[in-house]
């Protein structure tokens, strides 16, 4: 079969299959162009989930007629010179507009600030019309109609209009977080209007617009740097989590990305603090020399490759854990709000006392009911009269000498005032109260003590009577042996056994009988993927967590006041004590102002 040159239209349609997967992809490319043009106001309008209409209007620098003619040609761009090592713009490939024009009805109207009139160009299914004069405001309006009309097969793979509209909304949210100084408005016949006013340099205010005001109250600031790589942003406290990872946003030099290395680092940073199946909320921004990151991995530019991925992963994990240690033990405000709603949702209504419903009602209550029209003193006297009471012998325990409770303002978690249902400790703080789950709290304290011991000295090892031989590719063996000293400290002794095998001579004693071959293969896979091997540490910490759960104070145990106060003081001194080993909160805080609202006092 003879080789032939493809037509320009077919080349653009092939490129469109990579760049423009769905309406949200087109929206992303057009918004990036507007931001690169210096726009401070971007308006997006859609219809039919973006398939029928997608219009992006900006007040950026605009284009001249000559630039407009080149803009719809493939690989024409103003954002790139002769190198891919210094990319400082969102777009740079010069493929978006010609790709959209090859599969849709595209029109672009634009005017520069100094021009007397604007210009317009239209591209329909890959056919370009000449540039014409047109009235226009400063900036650019890009209108895309009937997306994929030229490639009907692609329409069969589109989701519902509602799903496609939601995908565009998510793109706008990501861009809005990345550029807080820009005003974004998303509207259309297929949606309610979504507007994000500009917040200038206040990035947290923009995050609150997108993620909700609860994020502002439950966010911890991140600010770290390592080897000229900066990491800033905000991470939610562990008890403020979600059922999916949609509220994890990562930006690299201002570019929104969805890279598995970065998302896995966030997950690792919150390990042992969030329940299984729950996800943290975080907004992180990485800044580094453009030469140290490759953004040209995929046409959609959502994946990136770092020259030193281990440095980036370590920076994210270390910065988040340091922030959680510093300020992550506070309870999420949503817990107090849930408690407020629980108080308000009570449906009990007092019923009249009758002989049928209360046959054994004490006689003194009749006196109280009769005295409602009398003075309060008379009612109380009737209830307290000795002649109206029947003495009931009560066996009392010998009183326990209790030390005087400390002043609540002396400590963050306050001073103990009561224990409820032999499981919940109630403490008074300077401006509210705290309710502590005694089992969950002590479980975390025991686990942290065990984990500290685990990492402060070598783990005891047990020698295998017959060493296990694990056959692996030579590259995997090299990577494993490079970490052999670290494994030995954790109780796993390995050595080279020929060019393509590893001999396991010792395993961690606390793990008992185990699949040594499976563990070594898992460690080899981790090293090949991330250049880190945390699988063994995770197993040891999981066992420590299980032992802590069974060795902590059980629910149903009555504790003395000094024991409960000692537990609170230890919680205050232990990082991560705000959550148990399973990620559930160990305490809930209710402010005095919330309590006063419950009683209508504020």
Image (cartoon, rainbow, N blue to C red):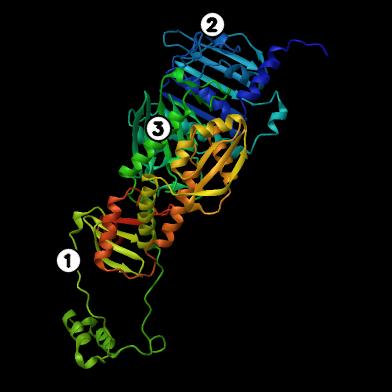
Residue 294 vertical position relative to residue 153 in the rendered view, above or below: above
Numbered disc 3: secondary structure: helix
Residue 473 vertical position relative to residue 279 in the rendered view, above or below: above
For the residue carrying disc 1, how many other residues have a C-alpha within 10 Å: few (<14), some (14-19), or many (20+)? few
Quadrant in which residue 10 is drawn: top right
| Mark in the foreground, 3 or 2 | 3
Q: CA distance from mark 3 to mark 1?
A: 46 Å
Q: CA distance from mark 3 to mark 2?
A: 46 Å
Residue 66 marker: 2
Please give left or right for residue 552 compared with residue 299 in the image. Answer: left
Quadrant in which residue 435 is drawn: bottom left
Q: Residue at x 59, y 17 (%)?
A: 95
Quadrant in which residue 486 is drawn: top left
Please give left or right for residue 273 compared with residue 425 in the image. Answer: right
The answer to whether marks 3 and 2 mark residues whose Cβ atoms lie closer than 8 Å is no
The residue to which callout 3 is attached is 315
Front-most of residues 99 and 480: 480
Q: How many marks?
A: 3
Q: Earlier in the sequence, mark 3 or mark 1?
A: 3
Image location (x, y in percent) of residue 304: 51, 26
Q: Earlier in the sequence, mark 3 or mark 2?
A: 2
Q: CA distance from mark 2 to mark 1?
A: 84 Å
Residue 340 vertical position relative to residue 462 in the rendered view, above or below: below
Q: Is residue 186 visible?
A: no
Q: Residue at x 34, y 28 (%)?
A: 200
Residue 404 marker: 1
């Amino acid at each position: 079969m003879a080789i032939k040159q493809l037509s320009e239209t077919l080349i653009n349609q092939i490129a469109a299959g990579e760049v423009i997967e769905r309406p949200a992809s087109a929206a992303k490319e057009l918004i990036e162009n507007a931001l690169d043009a210096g726009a401070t106001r971007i308006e997006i309008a859609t219809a039919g989930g973006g398939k029928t209409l997608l219009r992006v209007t900006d007040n950026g620098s605009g284009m001249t007629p000559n630039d407009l003619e080149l803009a719809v040609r493939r690989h024409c761009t103003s954002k790139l010179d002769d190198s891919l090592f210094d990319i400082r713009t969102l777009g740079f490939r010069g493929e978006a507009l010609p790709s959209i024009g090859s599969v849709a009805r595209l029109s672009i109207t634009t005017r520069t600030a100094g021009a007397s009139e604007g210009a317009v160009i239209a591209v329909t299914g890959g056919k370009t019309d000449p540039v014409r004069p047109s009235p226009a405001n400063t900036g650019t309006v890009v209108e895309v109609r009937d997306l994929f009309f030229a490639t009907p097969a692609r329409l069969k793979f589109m989701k519902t209009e509602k799903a496609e509209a939601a995908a565009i909304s998510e793109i706008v949210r990501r861009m809005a977080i990345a550029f807080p100084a820009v005003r974004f408005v998303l509207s259309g016949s297929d949606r309610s209007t979504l507007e994000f006013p500009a917040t200038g340099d206040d990035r947290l205010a923009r995050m609150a617009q997108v993620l909700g005001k609860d994020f502002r109250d439950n966010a911890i600031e991140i600010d770290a740097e390592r080897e000229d790589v900066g990491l800033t942003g905000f991470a939610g406290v562990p008890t403020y989590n979600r059922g999916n990872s949609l509220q994890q946003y990562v930006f690299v030099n201002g570019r929104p990305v969805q890279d598995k290395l970065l998302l896995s680092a966030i997950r690792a940073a919150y390990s042992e603090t969030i329940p299984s199946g729950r996800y943290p909320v975080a907004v992180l921004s990485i800044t580094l020399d453009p030469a140290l990151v490759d953004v040209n991995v995929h046409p959609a530019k959502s994946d990136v490759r770092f020259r030193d991925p281990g440095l980036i992963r370590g920076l994210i994990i270390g910065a988040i854990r340091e922030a959680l240690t510093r300020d992550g033990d506070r309870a999420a405000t949503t817990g107090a709000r849930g408690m407020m709603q629980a108080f308000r949702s009570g449906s009990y209504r007092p019923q009249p006392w009758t002989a049928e419903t209360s046959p054994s009602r004490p006689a003194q209550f009749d006196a109280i009911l009769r005295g409602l029209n009398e003075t309060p003193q008379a009612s109380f006297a009737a209830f307290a009269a000795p002649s109206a009471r029947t003495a009931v012998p009560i066996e009392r325990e010998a009183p326990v000498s209790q030390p005087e409770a400390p002043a609540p303002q002396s400590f963050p978690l306050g001073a103990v005032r009561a224990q409820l249902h032999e499981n919940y400790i109630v403490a008074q703080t300077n401006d509210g109260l705290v309710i502590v789950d005694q089992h969950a709290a002590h479980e975390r304290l025991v686990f942290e003590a065990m984990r500290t011991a685990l990492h402060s000295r070598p783990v005891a090892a047990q020698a295998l009577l017959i060493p296990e031989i694990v056959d692996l590719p030579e590259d995997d063996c090299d990577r494993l042996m490079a970490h052999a000293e670290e494994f030995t400290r954790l109780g796993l002794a390995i050595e080279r056994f020929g060019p393509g095998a590893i001999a396991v001579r010792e395993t961690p004693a606390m793990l008992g009988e185990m699949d040594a071959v499976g563990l070594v293969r898992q460690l080899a896979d981790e090293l090949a993927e991330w250049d880190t091997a945390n699988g063994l540490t995770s197993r040891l910490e999981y066992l420590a967590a299980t032992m802590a759960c069974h060795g902590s104070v059980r629910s149903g145990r009555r504790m003395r006041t000094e024991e409960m106060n000692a537990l609170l003081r230890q919680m205050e001194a232990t990082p991560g004590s705000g959550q148990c080993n399973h990620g559930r909160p160990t305490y809930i805080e209710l402010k005095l102002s919330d309590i006063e609202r419950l009683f209508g006092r504020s």
